[in-house]
Amino acid sequence: MAEHHHAAAGSPAQPDDFNVDEKWADQVVVLSVGGSVDMLSAPWLTDAIESARAKSPTGMVVDLSRVEFLGSAGISVLVAAHENIGDSGKFAVVADGPATHRPLTLLGLGEIMSLYRTLDDALSALADR
């Protein structure tokens, strides 16, 4: 079931070229992101991460497989999410393709957070921990 977030008065609507779906695999929440993650959409990604985290998942995967553009604002959101979830253990990012994998690896984020090429890889890694 898709949840529709109604923007509060005065806050911008979710950009047309951005979407995020929350799914669950056992106790792990998967946020599947599509479109452009930039200054306009980054707050929406933060909201999705925070609302998922509030449900106390055992792990979180942010799946960027459908993302066409990942800007610095979006990368900042991932870093913040990793720091917030960090020690409770399980945070993974699925990034495959030049738009997402390349900027994350160039910035060295593969050193601080778990990057996977596929959702299956990320889920099995979180399940093992």
Image (cartoon, rainbow, N blue to C red):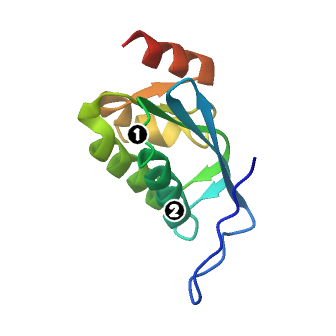
Does label 2 or label 1 sit earlier along the sequence?
2
| Rendering coords of residue 63 (x, y %) | 59, 36
Under circle 1, the secondary element is loop
Which image quarter holds the C terminus?
top left
Q: Amino acid at mark 1?
A: Ser
**In this view, the mark in front (2 or 1):** 1
Please determine whether, in this image, residue 15 is positioned above or below residue 72.
Answer: below
Say which residue appears at 55% left-offset and 63% top-offset. Answer: 44
Residue hosting label 1: 56
The answer, for residue 16, to whether it is visible in the render is: yes
Total marks placed = 2
The answer, for residue 118, to whether it is visible in the render is: no
Please determine whether, in this image, residue 11 is positioned above or below residue 47.
Answer: below
The quarter holding residue 117 reads top right
Q: Amino acid at mark 2?
A: Ala
Please determine whether, in this image, residue 129 is positioned above or below residue 48.
Answer: above
In-image side of 23 versus 122 (left or right)? right
| Rendering coords of residue 89 (x, y %) | 30, 28
Say which residue appears at 35% left-offset and 47% top-offset. Answer: 79
In-image side of 67 versus 95 (left or right)? right
Query: How dense is the environment of label 1, judged by Cα within 10 Å: few (below 14), some, or many (20 and up)?
Result: few
Query: How dense is the environment of label 2, judged by Cα within 10 Å: few (below 14), some, or many (20 and up)?
Result: many
Front position in the image: 27 or 119? 27
Say which residue appears at 50% left-offset and 29% top-offset. Answer: 28
Residue hosting label 2: 42
- The Cα atoms of the two marked residues, 2 and 1, are separated by 22 Å
Under circle 2, the secondary element is helix
Say which residue appears at 55% left-offset and 16% top-offset. Answer: 121
The quarter holding residue 106 reads top left
Extreme residue in the top direction: 128
